[in-house]
Amino acid sequence: MNDQAQLAEHFDRSRGHLRGVAFRMLGSADEADDAVQETWLRACRADSASVDNLTAWLTTITGRVCLDMLRSRSRRREDFADLTELDMLAPHEETADPADEAVLADSVGLALLVVLDTLGPAERAAFVLHDLFAVPFDEIAVIVERTPAAAKKLASRARRRVHDTADVPSSDLVRQRVVVDAFLAASRAGDIDALLAVLAPDVVRRADAVALRGQVRAQAEMRGARAVAEETRTNIRRARFAWPALVNGAVGAVVAPHGRLQLVIEFAFSGDRIASIDVIGDPARLKEVRLGLADGAAVAEPSVRRQFSVQSA
């Protein structure tokens, strides 16, 4: 299949799949679009006449493009400059792309993006391609320029970090998740009564200086359910980017606009209520936090549970 028109037709049919791969590898819809465009340019320059599985071939090219972008990003490491930008980044229903917002707003998807961002480029590539898109290790090895055995080890190491082990029994984890879900839902709605229902009467909220930046009259420590609930109601826009995650072995939350971590919220529980809230924004502290998925295993996309043939680009 060396006809340019046929290649273009297959590329168009594969665009959604390639964008899904790129989005999960890069955590950015805009960068994913750039990666897909670069995939097309590289595919046009290559000889596809002898390619048996064009989807696998295009996936390989996309993987290489994304890996190059991840390595470049790790060298210059870009982050949002200020937490006050969260207000400007809040999505508006009338302008948001429903498909993009559905991906970004999904609790597991967003938490996964945050955890993936803690991985090295090669680890992230190996995990995403194998665990989420069922690409075999022989193919991944070509992309990351390692042996298949080394590629398997990269994915295994990444998997252990993504699925961090909880420090509490599974029954407690389920209970914590219910409480955190209720807290986040009430926070997004600005519902004082719902917040009071999940906060212990003597709850303590602590926040570091970075987390408090941009908040008027914010205090490093606040006590009492009413005071904490009232303050939480002023953070509705931040709450739109908050989703459950495993934080230091228990259920907590991450605030991550477009999948880029800005805040970690660590909870302590007393029965079915929140006894303390620790809001972490300091970069040095964020690096020390153990993050993992709160909802178990990430699974391969159903539409890509296929065997990819090894192709070179």
Image (tube, helix red, strand yellow):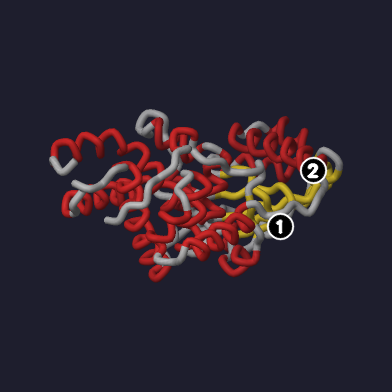
Q: Residue 104 placed where, x, y %?
A: 47, 40
Give how far across and how far down residue 211 sits, in percent.
59, 58
Q: Is residue 277 visible?
A: no
Determine which of the numbered discs, if any, sits on residue 248 in the image: 1
Would residue 250 be found to the left or right of residue 45 on screen?
Answer: right
Q: Which is nearer the eye, 28 or 237?
A: 28
Badge count: 2
Give residue 268's position: percent from left, percent from top. Answer: 78, 50
Give the residue number, with chain letter if any, for mark 2: 170
The image quadrant of residue 183 is top right
Choose top left, top right, bottom left or bottom right for residue 14. Answer: top left
User: Disc 1 or 2, which lies upstream in sequence?
Assistant: 2
- Please give left or right for residue 76 compared with residue 225 in the image: left
Find numbered disc 2 in the image and state the secondary structure of the residue it sits on: helix
Query: In the rendered structure, which amino acid carries the disc numbered 1?
Result: Asn
Amino acid carrying mark 2 in the image: Ser
Q: Quadrant of the N terminus?
A: top left
Within 10 Å of disc 1 (Cα), the crowding (few <14, some 14-19, many 20+) is some
Decide which of 174, 57 is in the foreground and name it: 57
Decide which of 267, 246 is in the foreground and name it: 246
**Crowdedness of circle 2 by 10 Å Cα count: few (<14), some, many (20+)?**
few
> Does residue 189 lie above or below 230 as drawn?
above
Which of the two marks, 1 or 2, is nearer to us in this view?
Answer: 2
Give the position of the C terminus as an image quadrant.
bottom left
Q: Residue 151: x, y in percent?
A: 49, 61
Residue in the image at 31% along x and 48% along y:
57
Residue 137 in view (yes/no): yes
The answer to whether mark 1 and mark 2 are in CB contact below 8 A is no
**SS of the residue at dot 1?**
loop
> Residue, x 62% and y 39% (percent of image)?
233
